[in-house]
Amino acid sequence: MSSNKRLVEEVFSKIPSFNNDIVNEMIDAELKNLDKKIIVLDDDPTGVQTVHGISVYTDWSLDSIEKGFQEENSMFFILTNSRGFTAAETREAHQEIAATIVKAAKKNNRDFTIISRGDSTLRGHYPLETKVLKETVESNSETRFDGEVILPFFKEGGRFTIDNIHYVQYDEYLVPAGETEFAKDRTFGYTKSHLGEWAEEKSQGEYQAENMTYISLEALRSLDIETIEQQLLQVENFNKVIVNAVDYSDVKVFTVALIRAMNKGKNFMFRSAAALTKVIGGVGDKSLLTRQELMKEETQNGGLVIIGSHVKKTTEQLEELKKSDAVELIEFDVHLVLEPTKFEKELNRIVETTNQLLSEGKNVAVYTRRERLDLGEGKKEEELKLSVNISDAVTSIVKSLEVRPSFIIAKGGITSSDIGTKGLEVQKATVAGQIRPGIPVWTTGTESKFPGISYVIFPGNVGTKTDLREVVEMLNRK
């Protein structure tokens, strides 16, 4: 770990506190002045980790987007799964989505705001996604964007922005994001932890850190809404607005100033983690889901866990799960992807064993071999293509199920997206809430392979070491 890590307690003790009741009153009043449909484009399904009672559409047809516009809720999500796309696929998808949103907005005579929900550890196709959205919306409508708000704070996952530096919490320490394993991501790596410098690095110098607007914790904590609003009113040329935050109240104060600036004609694009969506969507707090809420119909069959993510946290959680007697574990040797015949044989073995164990009332956890498939230098795109083949194989396990599991848990963003859309064939799900902080649960729609099943979307980089094991044991057939 880095020399720049800081003790959580020490850092937080220096941040002034404020009256949450006043802040809650302010945001509740201000949200009534926001007459826009909020459309959240989620680059993997974990972005619903702070909300409940909200719809998620898994395609971006005009029909689905219109349904979203016609809902009573002020906000809906579209799952793009673009974190698993190549840059070219991402560009194409976002052009299509933005053009369709403009069309639906005109038909329904509604104004809208787009939030590009990315990873709280700064991975994903940035700035490509927001740039394409901006250009497409502008070329299809009268709308012009003044700036882009960058807000990766996500409390439940221990991601905080302090003095413009984005941190990831590891136990009692805060580590600058640029010094974590996430910054070394093979596809979406970066070196900077200062968000202005990160945006400069990512935009290859098109936007300079020194020219960006910074919303400080001092201004937020002293409820200096006027100053923040003035800062926002001066943003132009799609420049970046970096928002510091260590608590939901910081996001609420910022959102009050933001709505005021928007109502004076300013237009922003957003790249944020999951906290902003909860605040701007006016979603209240809800306690963690109970077993009773999740297991609507008791069944004799076992539950299914699929573990695809390779981040360190997932592997630690898997090791902990192996200690549980509530689950049978099956390793999927995905390196056989390089030998198609053997790969197919391995997949058939897993599908047969899984069906058999589920029907015997046993919980099954299928996990991909932990070593990364490394083809060597300069093979990023080839590796991405192979990982798509692996992901398709993992998805087909769910597709081939003959037994309805009592629950399904998918570990990892891309894994859970593919299982949700391709394996379970969900077109629209409702977010039931969270089973643990930052770990959302979908209730699948009537059109899906297993209608009304509880589908736990367990992000790769979220949760304590024992969370996965505890969730499986909680859902275990009594």
Image (cartoon, rainbow, N blue to C red):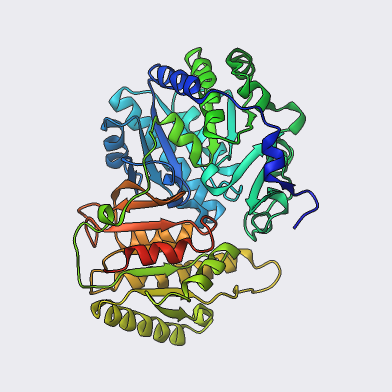
Q: Residue at x 42, y 79 (%)?
A: 329
Instruction: Indicate the position of residue 263 as horizontal and vertical percent values.
Output: 47, 14
Q: Quadrant of residue 10?
A: top right
Q: Nearer the viewer, residue 325 or 428?
A: 325
Quarter containing the C terminus: bottom left
Q: Nearer the viewer, residue 389 or 196?
A: 196
Instruction: Indicate the position of residue 239 as horizontal and vertical percent values.
Output: 65, 28
Decide: is 294 above or below 127: below
Q: Nearer the viewer, residue 325 or 271?
A: 325
Residue 225 seen anywhere in this rendered image of the structure: yes
Counting labels gives 0
Decide: is 282 above or below 318: above
Q: Residue at x 73, y 53 (%)?
A: 179
Residue 392 seen anywhere in this rendered image of the structure: no
Q: Residue at x 56, y 35 (%)?
A: 247
Q: Residue at x 58, y 24 (%)?
A: 18
Instruction: Indicate the position of residue 240 as horizontal and vertical percent values.
Output: 64, 30
- Horizontal side of 51 relative to 259 (left or right) equals left
Decide: is 300 above or below 292: below
